[in-house]
Image (cartoon, helix red, strand yellow):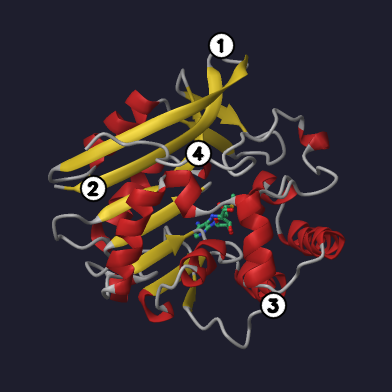
Amino acid sequence: MQLKPSVEKITVPADELPPHLAPKDWMIDAPPLGDWAKRFYAEYVSITDEKELIDHLLEVRRRAWAVYQYRCIASFLFVNYNLREMYGAEWYQGILNRVNSGQKFLDLGCAFGQTGRDLVYDGAPQENIISGDLREEFWELGYDLYRDRHKFHAEFRQGDVFDPEYLADYDGQIDIVHVSSFFHLFEQKAIIHRLMRLVSSKRGSIIFGRQMGNTIPWFRKHPLRRGQGLYQHSEESFKAMFESVAPGKWDVQAWLTKRDVPADNGGFRGRLRFIITRL
Ligand SMILES: C[S@@+](CC[C@H](N)C(=O)[O-])C[C@H]1O[C@@H](n2cnc3c(N)ncnc32)[C@H](O)[C@@H]1O
């Protein structure tokens, strides 16, 4: 299957790359609101007034930033992210159909739980969606962000993906894994190993998501967190990394949407999206 980023025109700014900012400028003044976000926050969160929505998002970001300083929080990447626009309407419909028919969807490194809500907003049954994160504070903030404690009851599991016991009761039972702005935080082979236990051995199991990429693979020291880094893959190195670890046959599709400004290693950074399907 040849992957297409989207069969529809992508609504700016859902797929707009965040600007190349110095860490001191990460805190952008106000969230850019794309059409999808305006509709989602009006219909799911019941905030229709744009000024009220911006104030609400600024307040949640302030509290989230105090929990942990992620760039995706500072620059409001969570506001416009939705699976339909990121991966294409037709492909996403296939994912929705599978979750609707009982398949299990895991969002790993879920933060506020935005992807679980995205699916539920589009009609997916909550009982088939599991979200996991190291920091339960983000998940709790999600109820304030989405004002849905009364109606959103999908399962959350707090834990560390590197703890072999974490999610162990789901081993072999997950049909679809979503990981967004997550893989690049780590040397990725260890996570692939872990995911190989979690995902179902059935044909068609999927791991998909996005992370920071680069036309020239690079380990970049994190600009804020000493001792940490950002692992940036190219399309080719990501594929090779996955295939060097994952047993069995998989179709690995990855595509990089790059910025025009060169990175310090001479390559071009950008967003690497991937869809990996068990054959
Ligand atoms: C950069 S944020 C991305 C959040 C969200 N997926 C998104 O795209 O906006 C990374 C998330 O991974 C979680 N995380 C970091 N290390 C983790 C670990 N070892 N196990 C599980 N979750 C982890 C963080 O708490 C955070 O919510």
Q: Amino acid at mark 2?
A: Thr
Q: Judge by depth and name the residue closer to the eye, 68 or 104.
A: 104
Q: Closer to the N terminus: mark 2 or mark 1? A: 1
Q: Which residue occupies 26% across, 34% down?
A: 2
Q: Quadrant of ligand 1?
A: bottom right
Q: CA distance from mark 1 to mark 3?
A: 44 Å
Q: CA distance from mark 3 to mark 2?
A: 34 Å
Instruction: Say if 70 sits above or below 64 in the image.
Output: above
Q: Closer to the N terminus: mark 1 or mark 4? A: 4
| Label 4: few (<14), some (14–19) or many (≥20) C-alpha neighbours in 10 Å | few
Report which residue position mark 2 lands on. Answer: 277
Depth check, mark 3 against mark 2: the one in front is 3
Instruction: Indicate which disc residue 147 carries.
Output: 3
Instruction: Say if 47 sits above or below 272 in the image.
Output: below
Q: Which residue occupies 82% across, 58% down?
A: 54
Report which residue position mark 1 lands on. Answer: 266
Q: Judge by depth and name the residue closer to the eye, 88 or 145.
A: 88
Q: Is mark 3 within 8 Å of ligand 1?
A: no
Q: CA distance from mark 4 to mark 3?
A: 30 Å
The residue at the far bottom in this view is 150
Q: Amino acid at mark 4?
A: Lys
Q: Which residue occupies 82% across, 65% down?
A: 49
Report which residue position mark 4 lands on. Answer: 9
| Label 1: few (<14), some (14–19) or many (≥20) C-alpha neighbours in 10 Å | few
The residue at the far top in this view is 266
